[in-house]
Each structure stands twice: as C-alpha cells, then as structure tokens.
Amino acid sequence: MRLLEGHYALGAEVKLGREPLYLATVRDPVDRFLSDYYYRNDQRTSWPAGKRERHAFWTYDIDRFVDHVYAQRAWNQINVQCRYLGGEDNFAAAKRAVDERVFLAAPSNRLNEALQLLRPVLELNSTQAPRRNVGKTRRASPPPSAETLVKIRDMVSEDQRLFDYVSAEFDALYRKAAVASTSRAA
C-alpha cells in the first residue's frame, strides 16, 4: 500500500499504477480562509525580495485584506475545497464527487474519529491525528472583526455547503458504525 498525502485535486494525484482510493478531509471554510491568510504571512520571508511587498496578503491586516478582496470580487482562491473535490468552485460538483468517488470524507475537526473508522482496514498504530502548520502570525494577531467574518462567509458559501454536507454525512456514518460496533459487542 502506498499513501499519498497532500492537497490533490481528485484525479490529479501522482499515478501509482492502480485505481486510487480517495479519503478526503474538509475544513471549516472560514477557518481555512483565515489559516491560509496567516500561513502566507508566516511564509513572507521565504519569498524573493521584490515580490514580498506586492501581495495583498502582506500589505494588509486581515480586515483590510478581506475588504480589498471582497470589493474587487477577486475571489480566485475561494471555494477551493469544492474546486479540489469537484473540479469546479460549486457545491453541486463537489457533492457529486464526494458521493461517487470518495471512499470516506470527513470534516477535519473529526479526523480522529475518521481514523477510528479506518483503523481496522489500515492497521493504524494511532487514531490521534498530528496537528501541523500552526502559524506564529495567527497566534499573535487580533481576531478578524464581525464584519470581516460575514464577508468571508459570503465568499466561501459553496465550501460552507460542502463542509456542512460532509459533516452531516460523516456524523450519520459514524453513528451507524457505533451502533454496529455495539451490536457486535452484545
């Protein structure tokens, strides 16, 4: 078994010579948007000197950045999770992909439970997911304003639908697995 980990659009992963089995995690889209902004700020020093000052990520604080992006409707990095899963930036395409191509989709805040479901099949040593990419900039920055959060929610509305759908489907699957486990134990 070979496991590829990362951000791959369905079908765009490295080819390993056999049909892939897709496992997907979907993150709360507002948190993902904020995380992306702060992650890029943490990466600023790794960019070439002439490019650092030209990016809105590094020019504005989070509130001004969202105002800038929102006013321009420059939403080219919005609904990214729908785009990765469905090839388009809309919920309908992502839902179709989750329903037809993904073996297990889980919300990222329930990753430990997803690993519990996979443990019997993958012989996992642990069902505790590691935490990665916790940025320095986000921890040291004031939280975004309520108005900023409303704008972000508007921009990521299709990803929000996807997150809500995956969360509900995963919850139903997890409950079903718990009932089956209880029945086997009885």
Image (cartoon, helix red, strand yellow):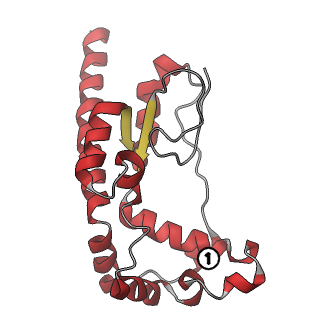
Image spot of residue 84 (x, y percent) = 42, 50
Q: Dot 1: what SS? A: helix
**Quadrant position of the C terminus in the picture:** top left
When asked about the image quadrant of residue 99, the answer is top left
What's the residue at 44%, 67% (across, down)? 77
Q: Please name whichever residue, 172 or 22, is drawn nearer the observer in this view of the structure.
A: 22
Q: Is residue 122 visible?
A: yes
Image spot of residue 98 (x, y percent) = 31, 38
Q: Residues within 10 Å of mark 1 (few under 14, many from 20)?
A: some
User: Could you tell whether 60 is left or right of 78 in the image?
Assistant: right
Image spot of residue 161 (x, y percent) = 24, 56
Image spot of residue 143 (x, y percent) = 45, 80
What's the residue at 43%, 40% (across, down)? 24
Per the image, the residue denoted by label 1 is 41
When asked about the image quadrant of residue 114, the answer is top left
Residue type at mark 1? Answer: Asn
Is 132 situated above or below 140?
A: above
Is 69 situated above or below 43?
A: below
Is 68 situated above or below 78?
A: below
**Quadrant position of the N terminus in the picture:** top right
What's the residue at 31%, 11% (across, down)? 185
What's the residue at 47%, 38% (across, down)? 11
User: Could you tell whether 52 is left or right of 167 in the image?
Assistant: right
Is 184 situated above or below 79?
A: above
When asked about the image quadrant of residue 10, the answer is top left
